[in-house]
Amino acid sequence: MYRTLKHFSLSLFLFCNFEFNLAQLSTCSGTGCPTNGVWGAWETIGDKACDMECGGCGTLFQTRDCISAPVCNCTGPSNRNIGCNNVACKYPTQKTCCPPFVPMVLNGTQVCGPLPKNIENSACCPQTALMSQWTGWQLQNSQWARTRDCLTVSIGCPCTGQTLTQTQATCPCAQPSNATSACSNLAIATPIYYRQLIINDATGSADLVLIAQNQGAGKIYCKALTDAYGSALGYEGAMLMMQEVSGQCTTDTVFGCAKGTDNARQNATFTCDGSTGNWIYDFTGKQIVGIVQGSWN
């Protein structure tokens, strides 16, 4: 019962503090910015459990962000220590509330207040809609979707006319570039054959068709492989050269080459990372930005 009463009182206080949000504010004139900018909600950092049970005697450390920057700069503190557990202490404790709180009666219940506001009132709404960054693209029922938020809706300033959700049928990962330049200094192979991925938009997957047979001098796509001790491994490997996000060129022997004309083309597979827009090479899990098939030196 005590815990229920404590949370009930706190909820009522917060409701009173946020009631102003229900009415839309007018648009700012002049510079188009509220005097103090637009602050986000206070968020508790570290241990979120209050170290005292009543009276607002415990403390929590909180920080907040200026959500209107750089359009509208903010003035005021970005961190604070606040009291917590504001239900009034009962007899026989020495005091009902810890400073700066004083006993107050709310709907017949004694609490310690007033509580600091979680979001400060804004005198007006910025002239420019303040939006969060778009999330990464996610595949939903064969469609790609991403979302963003209106950062000022909590202070009574909706972002009228702004799009919050975007959808598209096309995979958001662009074709990897030709990695010939990035992979030109490797000793084991020379980049020679570039081909674009075959992309399946509905699944976010892609195939790279690689040549699986030699094609004369200078196009040694397949080579008999040996282990670290020089012993033959018994098959020939095709060389895939890839430029990773870091810029480094890496290689992989994707498959054993065909004998004769059977399976003269074989695939390497990739998956689109909608959050970065890069392709992931399925075998290594590494993100890549460039591809090319190499001819063995």
Image (cartoon, grey):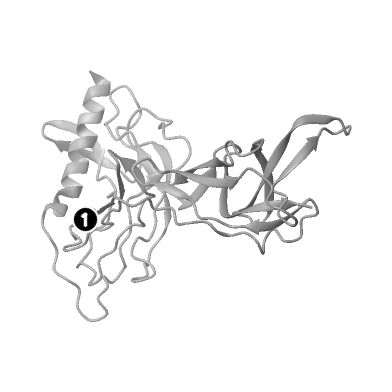
Q: In this view, does 282 lie to the left or right of 10?
A: right
In this view of the protein, which residue sits in the foreground, 81 or 271?
A: 271
Residue 274 visible? The answer is no
Decide which of 146, 6 is in the foreground and name it.
146
Of residues 280 and 117, which is closer to you in this image? 280
Q: At which x and y percent is residue 18?
A: 19, 49
Going 88% across and 34% down the picture, which residue do you hit? 230
Q: Residue under label 1, please give it.
A: 153
Residue at 89%, 32% (x, y): give it.
229
Residue at 68% over, 55% down: 248
Q: Is residue 60 visible?
A: yes
Which amino acid type is shown beneath numbered disc 1? Answer: Val
Q: In this view, does 214 lie to the left or right of 76?
A: right
The single residue placed furthest to the bottom in the displayed view is: 30
In the displayed structure, would residue 109 be above or below residue 16?
above
Query: Residue 147: image x %, image y %?
Result: 29, 51
Percent position of residue 281, x then y: 56, 43
